[in-house]
Amino acid sequence: MTIALIDYGSGNLRSAAKAFERVVQDLGRSDDVAVTNDPDVVARADRVVLPGVGAYADCRAGISAIDGMMEALDEAVIARAQPFLGICVGMQLMATTGFEFGETPGFGWIPGAVQPLAPADKTLKIPHMGWNELFWVGYQEHPVLKDLANGQHGYFVHSYQFMPEVSEHLLAVTDYGGPVTAAVGRDNLVGTQFHPEKSQAVGLKLIENFLKWTP
Amino acid sequence: MLKARVIPCLDVNEGRVVKGVNFVDLVDAGDPVEQAQLYDAAGADELCFLDITASHENRDTIFDVVARTAEHCFMPLTVGGGVRTTDDIRKLLLAGADKVSINTAAVHNPDFVREASEKFGAQCIVVAVDAKRVDAETREPSPDGTRFEIFTHGGRKATGIECISWAEKMADFGAGEILLTSMDRDGTKNGFDLALTRAVADAVPVPVIASGGVGNLDHLVDGITEGHASAVLAASIFHFGTYSIQEAKAHMLAHGAPVRMDEAIA
């Protein structure tokens, strides 16, 4: 199968690709991990991953700037309902609207807004950066979260968080001066605010679950 | 809760790990990719490569080192040294870096930090601040001085810029993190300059990584509890096997600095 990692001119692409390649290899599979900006590859992919290092508006503009990419995403992820994983900003882009460097429309796949982190405790640093505990909520039986225990750590680097409108779309939270969205999902879509590709054993397990997922 | 990070730093010179004492007298300490793998397996929270010769020559060797490291390491990787343009940043990210550290280029052109942050996101932009104590009156370097100033080029060039306001300005311009090195302490094993660390950490809204001077595990604890840093960076105590990452973390945890103790990758 083809796992398409979308290259939109930003993002820690190789880092994400290497994690997927490692999991594919460990599973003894022969999946093709394609880092691509080709809408045709994305439209036909069996798994679509949108990695994320970047500012919301810039990432959104980067995707819009690739002729046919948004249509290809819709084709693969909405029309053909292939599993989609958004990481960090890639997860946030599934929202209705983002508010980093101005108001920017997202994909509108999961209703909600992406808002600045604003912990009441002003000694807490922004960005929220580093390893923090994951607490799985809602959809306990979600296949992508299989064998991930409460209290294990994920690596976070972000200043904004996805605030889903529908509570069932919240899959995990972490605590940073109050609950902060750590994962969201609905149907064939999942997204993590933390970086599975940077979260050592925990992250590789999540990627493995994603590759085995048949929603 | 968010954990304090332990970050081994590999100073890389022409593709080999070195550790400088006050940035001179380089001693070869091995292959960076091999060391990165060992640190990944040991549960390091993050890894930092500083390409200390990047300003001069052999720029491309670091891309190769980063790419080979990314094949094996699934923890955040910061790369610094000679980062001057957004194209440099993109190339490092494509090679496998997660963050880049900007030092000299930020001093020469602070707007570069703003540009880089808007392009790649603040979380990707670390500004390295090399500070030295100077006499408050004469502005001459002095280990007992009470004023902190910025130096560039591995501590060789004075800029006259006051450190704390500079760090605040860099955070304001979009730095997601400040990598703060005491040039007075670097390589001495006498511990972080805690007054410097605390002054900067309390002044800026972004995380501060304390660097320069770690000689024992109490120093790591002090950096977090007294220096108010979010992360501690050390080189030689780990490279030369004085302490393991797990020993460091266990000691920190026992002394009031919360760290991640998840099972490391076998």
Image (cartoon, coloured by chain):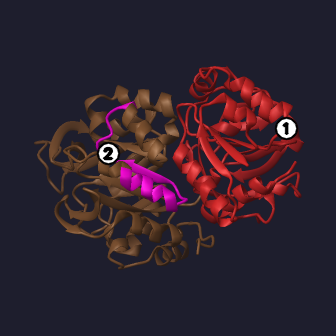
Chain colours: A red, B brown
Is B113 part of what is drawn in magenta? no
Q: Quadrant of the N terminus of chain B?
A: bottom right
Instruction: Report the span colored magenta.
Output: B64-86
Let me know if residue A117 appears in the view.
no
Can residue A157 be seen from the camera position used here?
yes
Q: Residue A20: x percent and y percent?
A: 63, 54
Left or right, residue B231 beside residue A114: left
Q: Secondary structure at mark 1?
A: loop
Examine the structure image and report whether residue B79 is included in the region drawn in magenta: yes
The amino acid type, in three-letter code, at marker 1 is Ala
* Image coords of residue B75 (percent x, y): 53, 58
User: Given the image, what chain letter belongs to the residue carrying mark 2?
Assistant: B
Q: Position of residue A202 (x, y in %)?
A: 67, 62
Return the residue at label 1: A81
Quadrant housing residue A109: top right
Taking depth in this image into account, of A30 and B63 the one nearest to the observer is A30
Give the distance between the C-alpha atoms of the residues marked 2 and 1, in whole angstroms: 48 Å
The disc at residue B129 is 2
Residue drawn at (70%, 65%), measured in percent from left and top? Answer: A27
Task: Name above or below for residue B94 compared with residue A115.
Answer: below
Chain of the residue where label 1 is placed in the rendered structure: A
* Crowd rating for badge 2 (residues with CA inside 10 Å; few <14, some 14–19, many 20+): many
Rendered location of residue B46, percent (x, y): 49, 59
| Front position in the image: A101 or A208 | A208
Q: Disc 2 vs disc 1: which is toward the camera?
A: 1
Q: Are marks 2 and 1 on the same chain?
A: no
Left-right relation of A113 to B231: right
